[in-house]
Amino acid sequence: MSFINIKIPKIKFKKLKIDNNIIDDLQYIDYEKLERKNIKHRNTPYEDMTNYKTVKEFFLKSIKEYANNPCILEKPSHKEEYKTITYKQFGEDVIGLGTALIDMLNLKGKRVIIIGETQYEWYISYMAMLCGVGIAIPTDKELPVNELTNIVLRSNASAIIYSKKLEGNIKKVKDKDLGIKYFIEMKSNDEIDGNEVGLNYLVEEGKKLVESGKNFFEKIEIDPEEFKILFFTSGTTSNSKGVMLNNRNLAENINAVSAYVKIYPVDRLFSVLPLHHCYESTIGFLLPIATGASIAICEGLKYIVPNIQEAKPTGILTVPLLVESLYKKINEKIVKSKKDKLINTMISITNALKKTGIDIKRKVFKEIYDNLGGNLRIIVSAAAPIDKKVGVWLENIGISFLQGYGLTETAPISALTPEYNPCIGSVGKPIVQADVKIENPNENGEGEILIKTPTLMIGYYQDEVETKKAIDEDGYFHSGDVGYIDEEGYIFITGRSKNVIVTQNGKNIYPEEIEMLLDKEDEIKESMVYGKKPEAQSKKEEKELIITARVIPDYTKIEEIYGKLSKEEIYDVIWKKIKDVNKKLTSYKAVKNLEIKEGEFEKTSTMKIKRYKELSNQN
């Protein structure tokens, strides 16, 4: 629901100094003595898939089984090293906070907004809510005061847990007297003063209550079907809806992942996306907690490289824009170091060896790995389409590239790439618990994707009409996404039904397909394609939409290639690139009009363009 103008900062990596003699060194390896791994591909899910019913079930299991393992890593300040919080401390803090929220503030069964940047207190607040306090309302920290006020009123919230950085906006909400009983500040030790209190104070007081014998919180039984989470969506095509979820929805996400991907206690996920989004709070937080893995918090996008190099994660959960930025920067370094031909040769050699069961990619591409912390083994991309060549390159250097598909309404996972049999270009296979089908497929097998799954929401908050529109009588959720399923069961997304441009002769054009091609051009930073209504000159023109590309030029790249150019010259450069792209498209899909976009596109928190907002603010 946020109005975020996402701007990926300049990502800097050290100069690559890959030894030209490495290929010669490979010739002297005694491959007969190297252990050959079983290279047979699985075609079925892992047999030891979990069967959790609630979040609390795996929370209690993990804080005992992995008590002394690292749980959350957070930097107290930019200049300080990561501080490690163990599962034991995490568990004690969650139980302490939950006890205090119920016993001291009387918030049992109440609705609590959690708002702020990613930090330890956000994690324990969310977990305390899920494990027995009330209904959690994860909220976008970028909301202006009027929209935050609207969330408070719509949700009937009783308390707000907020970060210090939002103190100004929270004060304005407080002044409106909206019936909030408590304003709880993260990282604060302040005692209760009217309706204000520090979260750290509550944690410590709650621990004292537990020590005195009040151990009721740990014993609270969770109904898997009970309404426990309210997410307000950050939709790209319409205003936000409230999505109601329960513990079962979240637990089934964990079960689903366990069937396709192995996450181990030694794994460490790098948290870079906002926690108010279901994608990050479920897969980026609850999944590692369920598996005993740890989470390293990124300080912010401008610190992403030094944070990765310090935290040394094994997995990164992210969105295409960020993956593509990392890919481009690493490959720019490779080209500048004049190592591109060498790398391509090494990729060919290591791919051939891997087919025989010998995988030496981590050794050969060690310097690339070191730029990413040294331990990275998985990158998961979701929320938007990604250029297939990025995934292929990652796999070529030995990093598993996985894609996920889902919506807030499916909490969020409804499909995922099986790590044991990936299919780059696809968003994965339906999770094992789901039934996914294509409605009214066309001659290419494309149609709207319908999903029936235990991860599916209870419904839209206070909106039965929209709920009935979204979920049909047979229990299938109408996703609004268009795609097809191949013979092996992999899902391919081709567009959004709400974004589709329909020509006069009934042809469907999905903007995402054209945008993907445009965004590959170096001179184009980002694009949005839509059907523009022409100025009426004849009856025919009144009906036919003009395929229009709204483009943000990559001014830095253009200057590198062409030197200083005027606005008119930049327009001509972009138009030439569009004509090149048109040659790759069937005639009816060709872009006929160009608009240069000044500034950034309005984005959701997962970096997707808010089309409906963009088109309502015509340049």
Image (cartoon, rainbow, N blue to C red):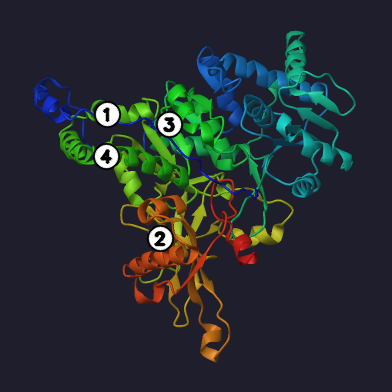
Cα distance in 3D space between marks 2 and 1: 32 Å
Q: Earlier in the sequence, mark 2 or mark 3?
A: 3
**Residue at the limit of the structure toward the bottom, as seen here:** 538
Q: Earlier in the sequence, mark 2 or mark 4?
A: 4
Q: Which residue is mark 4?
A: 396
Residue drawn at 38 percent across, 34 percent down? 378
Residue 134 at what x, y percent from top left?
Answer: 73, 33
Q: Earlier in the sequence, mark 4 or mark 1?
A: 1
Work out whether 5 lies above or below 50.
below
Q: Earlier in the sequence, mark 1 or mark 3?
A: 1
What secondary structure is found at the residue carrying circle 2?
A: helix
Cα distance in 3D space between marks 1 and 3: 25 Å
Residue drawn at 61 percent across, 32 percent down? 118
Residue 263 at what x, y percent from top left?
Answer: 42, 29
Residue 467 visible within the image: yes
Q: Amino acid at mark 2?
A: Leu
Residue 464 at what x, y percent from top left?
Answer: 71, 58
In terms of depth relative to the viewer, which is nearer, 143 or 227? 143
Question: For residue 315, which numbered disc appears in the image?
Answer: 3
Q: Which residue is mark 2?
A: 518
Mark 3 Cα shell of 10 Å, populated few (<14), some (14-19), many (≥20):
many
Q: Amino acid at mark 4?
A: Asn
User: Circles 2 and 3: CB distance less than 8 Å?
Assistant: no
Q: Amino acid at mark 1?
A: Lys
Left or right: where does residue 537 sit relative to residue 131?
left
Cα distance in 3D space between marks 4 and 1: 19 Å
In terms of depth relative to the viewer, which is nearer, 549 or 378? 549
Q: Earlier in the sequence, mark 3 or mark 4?
A: 3
In terms of depth relative to the viewer, which is nearer, 531 or 168? 168
Left or right: where does residue 230 sit relative to residue 506?
right
Mark 2 Cα shell of 10 Å, populated few (<14), some (14-19), many (≥20):
many
Left or right: where does residue 208 sit relative to residue 597?
right
